[in-house]
C-alpha cells in the first residue's frame, strides 16, 4: 500500500492531467463547432406589418402591402433637376440610386363599424407589393367582417385588393364608397380613348376591380359623412376625384392622405415639386400646400399611403416649408 507522500504525489499529478486536458478543450470544441455544426439558416422574412393606434375611441390599424424600388431619373419630379433632388434624398439618409416606395392602407374600427380606406393590391400590381392580405390577417381583420370600403381614388395600387385572382369580391358584405367625380372619370369611354399608353391600363384595372361591387357602390362628394366621424375632403389633382379622408372622434382628428402627398422627405419638404403620377400637377401642388398648412396649423396627425411604415406622424412648420415627424412606434395602442 503506498504511503501518504506517494498518495499526495499521485493526486497532484492527476490534477495536472485534468487541468492540462481542460486547457486543450476550447481548441477541440472550436474545431468541432466549425466542422461539425452549422448555424440555422437566416429566416429571410420580416414580421407581419401592421400598426395600431387610436383616434379618440376609434382603433386604427395601418396595413403594410410592401414596397417597390424605383430607379431615380429625371421623369420622377419634372420641375426639379437631379442635381437639386439628390442632395435632399442624401440628407434624409437614403440611397441616391433608387427610391423605395412603400404601400400602406388603413382599417378603422369605430366600435360599430369596421371600415377599410383603400385595400392594397392582393399581389396583382407588382411582385414586391404582395403582403397586404397576410398582414390584414395577422392583424386579426377578416374581410367578411368589413362593413364599408372607402377608396381615396381608383389607381390600381389602391383597389386591386378588392377581388381575388378570379375577380371574385373579397369583401363579401361591404359597401364600396367611391367619390362621384372619380367614378365618373374612370367610367367615361371618352377619357379612355384620350388616355396615353401609361394611363390606359388603369381604366381596365379600375373597371374590372369594381365590377363585382356595382350593385353596392355608394357615391359621395366633398364634405359627405361616410360614417360617424368619417368625412370626405375633395383633393383633386393626383386624380380628378381624389379624396382625403378625415377621421375624428372625441376631439381628436387625423387625415388619411391617400396619394395627395407621397414620400414625405421629398414632397412634404418640397410641396412645390411635382411628381410624375399626379394627373394634374399644378392642381396637385395647390392641394399639397393646403393640406400641409392645415395639418401643421391644427397639429393634426396624418397617414400617407406612400409614407415609410408605420406611416403615421405629424407635419411641422419649417420656415417657408414643412417637415414630417414620424410617430414613435409604441407597444401600446394609444
Image: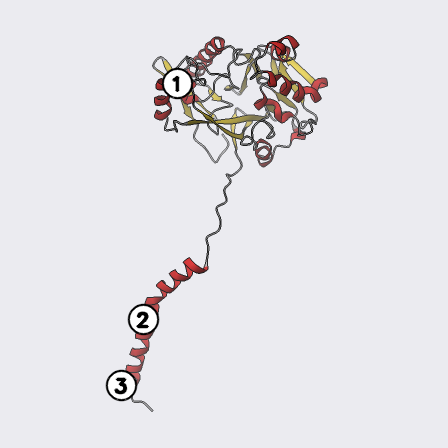
Q: Earlier in the sequence, mark 2 or mark 1?
A: 2
Callout 1: SS: loop
Please identify the quarter of the rendering in which residue 154 is found: top right
The residues bearing labels 3 and 1 have C-alpha atoms spaced at a distance of 87 Å
Q: Which of the two residues, 290 or 39, is positioned nearer the viewer here?
A: 39
Could you tell whether 128 is left or right of 11 in the image?
right
**Residue furthest to the bottom:** 1
Callout 3: SS: helix
Q: Which residue is mark 3?
A: 5
Query: Residue 22: percent from the left, percent from the top?
Result: 34, 68
Discs 3/2, front: 2
Callout 2: SS: helix
Q: Which residue is mark 1?
A: 269
The residues bearing labels 2 and 1 have C-alpha atoms spaced at a distance of 67 Å
Q: Is residue 110 above or below residue 235?
A: below
Please identify the quarter of the rendering in which residue 143 is found: top right
Query: Residue 317: percent from the left, percent from the top?
Result: 38, 16
Amino acid at each position: 500500500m503506498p504511503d501518504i507522500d506517494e498518495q499526495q504525489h499521485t493526486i497532484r499529478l492527476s490534477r495536472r492531467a485534468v487541468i492540462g486536458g481542460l486547457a486543450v478543450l476550447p481548441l477541440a470544441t472550436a474545431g468541432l463547432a466549425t466542422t461539425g455544426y452549422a448555424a440555422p439558416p437566416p429566416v429571410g422574412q420580416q414580421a407581419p406589418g401592421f400598426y395600431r393606434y387610436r383616434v379618440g375611441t376609434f382603433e386604427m390599424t395601418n396595413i403594410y402591402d410592401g414596397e417597390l424600388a424605383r430607379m431615380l431619373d429625371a421623369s420622377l419630379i419634372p420641375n426639379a433637376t437631379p442635381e437639386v433632388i439628390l442632395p435632399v434624398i442624401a440628407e434624409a439618409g437614403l440611397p441616391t440610386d433608387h427610391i423605395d416606395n412603400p404601400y400602406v392602407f388603413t382599417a378603422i374600427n369605430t366600435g360599430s363599424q369596421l371600415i377599410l380606406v383603400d385595400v392594397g393590391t392582393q399581389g396583382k400590381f407588382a411582385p414586391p407589393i404582395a403582403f397586404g392580405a397576410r398582414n390584414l390577417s395577422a392583424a386579426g381583420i377578416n374581410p367578411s367582417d368589413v362593413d364599408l370600403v372607402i377608396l381615396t381614388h381608383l389607381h390600381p395600387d389602391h383597389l386591386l385588393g378588392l377581388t381575388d385572382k378570379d375577380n371574385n369580391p373579397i369583401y363579401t358584405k361591404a359597401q364600396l364608397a367611391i367619390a362621384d367625380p372619380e367614378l365618373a372619370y374612370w367610367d367615361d369611354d371618352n377619357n379612355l380613348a384620350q388616355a396615353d399608353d401609361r394611363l390606359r391600363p388603369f381604366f381596365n384595372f379600375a373597371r374590372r376591380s369594381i365590377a363585382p361591387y356595382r350593385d353596392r357602390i355608394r357615391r359621395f362628394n366633398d364634405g359627405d359623412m361616410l360614417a360617424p366621424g368619417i368625412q370626405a375632403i375633395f383633393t383633386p389633382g393626383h386624380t380628378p376625384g381624389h379624396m382625403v379622408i378625415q377621421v375624428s372622434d372625441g376631439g381628436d382628428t387625423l387625415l388619411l392622405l391617400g396619394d395627395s402627398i407621397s414620400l414625405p422627405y421629398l414632397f412634404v419638404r418640397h410641396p412645390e415639386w411635382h411628381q410624375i403620377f399626379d394627373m394634374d400637377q399644378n392642381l396637385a401642388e395647390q392641394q399639397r400646400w393646403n393640406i400641409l398648412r392645415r395639418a401643421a396649423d391644427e397639429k393634426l396627425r396624418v397617414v400617407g399611403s406612400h409614407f415609410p411604415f408605420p406611416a403615421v406622424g405629424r407635419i411641422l412648420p419649417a420656415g417657408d416649408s414643412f417637415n414630417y415627424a414620424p410617430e414613435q412606434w409604441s407597444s401600446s395602442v394609444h
